């Protein structure tokens, strides 16, 4: 990953139930590329990670969602985990945050179940993307062209299927965030 993210601030939108490795590995890659990373959440304090079905580590929240300005970020990371995106879909403020990032043509990276929130934010129609296989019907019904590939990039939107895809996901995420806005 030779792209530089120096001077860029990336938001990681997550809440309790995120898949731990889908947050930690991309955050490591972003920081290694020089980015400032902020964990943004509807709750303050800490959020609970999971390793599949088992509780993992807790991660400190850097900024409450109510205090986060989408204009302050150069990109957005949406980790998966079943509980995390399902809970975020019910948060109007989270959907508005994602929508604002997308409308500003800023890059977004979503892995595993993370793309669920993109459906509610109105981001998937006409986009080529992938996800955890159980989201295929949801994404297709929302107008996405779903494919079963390790990593898919569509005009600044980076998606992957699962933790096995993290090396390719992280590389493409850093590349797209380095490119910046993807105006049509």
Image (cartoon, grey):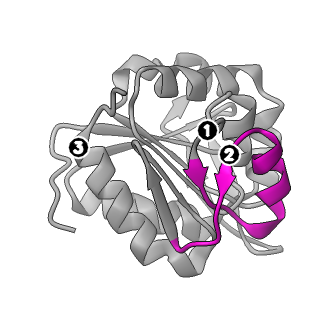
Q: CA distance from mark 1 to mark 2?
A: 5 Å
Left/right of residue 139 with respect to residue 13 in the rendered view: right
Q: Measure the C-alpha gap from mark 2 to mark 3.
A: 23 Å
- Residue drawn 61% across and 38% down? 126
Dot 1: what SS?
loop
In this figure, which residue is indicated by the disc labeled 3? 179
Between disc 2 and disc 3, the foreground one is 2
Direction from residue 130 to residue 91 in the image, left or right: right
- Mark 2, secondary structure of its residue: loop
The answer to whether residue 114 shows anywhere in this view is no
Q: Quadrant of residue 58?
A: bottom right
Q: Residues within 10 Å of mark 1 (few under 14, many from 20)?
A: few
Is residue 54 rendered to the left or right of residue 44? right
Q: Is residue 146 above or below residue 52?
A: above
Residue at mark 1: 126
| Pointer 1 with pointer 2, Cβ within 8 A | yes
């Amino acid at each position: 990953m030779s792209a530089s993210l120096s001077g860029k601030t990336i938001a990681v939108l997550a809440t309790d139930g995120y898949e731990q490795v889908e947050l930690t590995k991309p955050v490591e890659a972003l920081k290694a590329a020089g980015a400032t990373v902020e964990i943004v959440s509807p709750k303050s304090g800490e959020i609970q990670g999971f390793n599949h079905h088992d509780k993992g580590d807790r991660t400190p929240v850097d900024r409450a969602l109510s205090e986060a300005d989408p204009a302050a970020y150069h990109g957005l990371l949406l980790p998966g985990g079943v509980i995390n995106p399902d809970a975020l879909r019910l948060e109007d403020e989270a959907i508005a945050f994602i929508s604002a990032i997308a409308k500003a043509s800023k890059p977004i990276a979503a892995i595993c179940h993370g793309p669920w929130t993109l459906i509610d934010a109105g981001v998937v129609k006409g986009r080529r993307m992938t996800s955890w296989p159980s989201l295929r019907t949801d994404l297709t019904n929302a107008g996405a062209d779903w494919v079963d590939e390790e990593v898919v990039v569509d005009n600044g939107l980076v998606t992957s299927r699962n933790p096995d895809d993290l090396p390719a996901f992280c590389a493409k995420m850093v590349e797209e965030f380095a490119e910046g806005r993807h105006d049509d």
